[in-house]
Image (cartoon, rainbow, N blue to C red):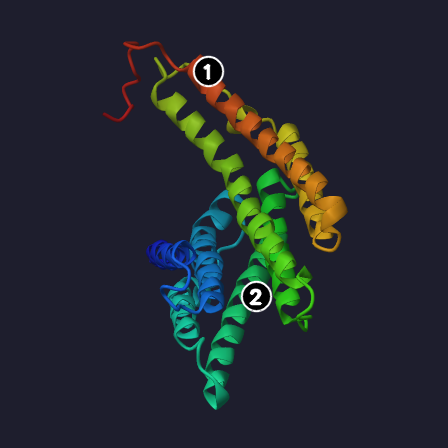
Amino acid sequence: AGIRLALAALAVTMVLGGLLAGAFAWPGATGWPLARLTDLHAMWGLQGWVGLLVIAIAFQVVPMFMVTPPYPALLTGGYTTAMFLLLTAASLSSGLQGPARLFHDACTVLLGAGYGVFGACTLYLLARRTRPTADPTTLYWRTAMASLLAALAVWLWPADQASNVRPLLLGVLLVAGVAQSAIHGMLYKIVPFLTWYHLREEAPGPGHKLPGINKIIPESRAKWQFWIHAAALLLLLAACFRPDALARPAAALMCVACLSLWYNLATAARLYWRLRPASGSPLSATAPT
């Protein structure tokens, strides 16, 4: 249900993006409130599409891949539905003025509180995981949840209308801190598992030796890539205050982090193609048809 709602939020994000593109392509022809559309576009993209997707995926993968206790039933029940309804109500009431504006403010505060509860609960579960050492995926998810809570703190901080620092901080924390970190972390679990799974299913016989899942992408290389990403994230946050001096170095370091991720994933793909049986080799009796 959470993934379906995230896809619905993506559809709304695309429609709002199309409206904005049309307004910029034909300026003056539409008369749409561009500032309001821009805010709604960002809201549905980050809180709807990205936020709901991360929540829905976390309910499944955090306990399974990171060996934590399950999320409480209060969260895994209708939590994503409630968040989607709050997002819808906040969007529809975004143009209200006067006393009715309190309804919009209440919806946005509840949305922020909802994401804060999810982030804090995930950090609590990660702290109670049964494995003593933190693997790269755990480090990435801790970074993602810490960035989510930091974004909430920045959002609550009084805004300085003459400065762009606050919206820049929010963008960096939500995009590079939350979304990118969660995606990178899951790739380090999903890609090695799928590589090992397909090699096992295509093995010529039951005695065929396969590398362990943890050997497909060495943990040491994945951790090095995480630390590069963490350094790039911190430098991007600093660049929000000094963009003239730090924006390009931060972007270059983030490129290095992404290229390192690409290299690590490419080694897993190369290992798969090197170890898979040649075309026409007999498969094991237990392989699915």
Instruction: Report the residue at 40% width, 28% height from top.
Output: 197
Quarter-wise, where is residue 26 in the image? Answer: bottom left
Q: Nearer the viewer, residue 212 or 143?
A: 143
Q: CA distance from mark 1 to mark 2?
A: 45 Å
Height in image: 171 above or below 133? below
Height in image: 55 above or below 204? below
Q: Which amino acid, by three-letter code, is at mark 2?
A: Gly
Q: Is residue 286 left or right of residue 272?
A: left
Q: Which amino acid, by three-letter code, is at mark 1?
A: Lys
Q: Nearer the viewer, residue 35 or 237?
A: 35
Q: Residue most toward the bottom?
A: 99
| Label 1 environment density (alpha carbons within 10 Å; few <14, some 14–19, many ≥20) | few
User: Comparing marks 1 and 2, which lies closer to the viewer?
Assistant: 2
Which label sits on residue 146?
none
User: From where the camera sits, is residue 156 visible?
Assistant: yes
Instruction: Report the residue at 63% width, 57% height from top.
Output: 168
Q: Are marks 1 and 2 in contact (CB under 8 Å)?
A: no
Q: Is residue 249 left or right of residue 209?
A: right
Residue behind mark 2? 116
Quarter of the picture containing the N terminus is bottom left
| Label 2 environment density (alpha carbons within 10 Å; few <14, some 14–19, many ≥20) | many
Which label sits on residue 209?
1
Quarter-wise, where is residue 240 in the image? Answer: bottom right
Q: Percent from the top left, x then y, of residue 156?
A: 64, 71
Instruction: Report the residue at 40% width, 21% height from top.
Output: 199
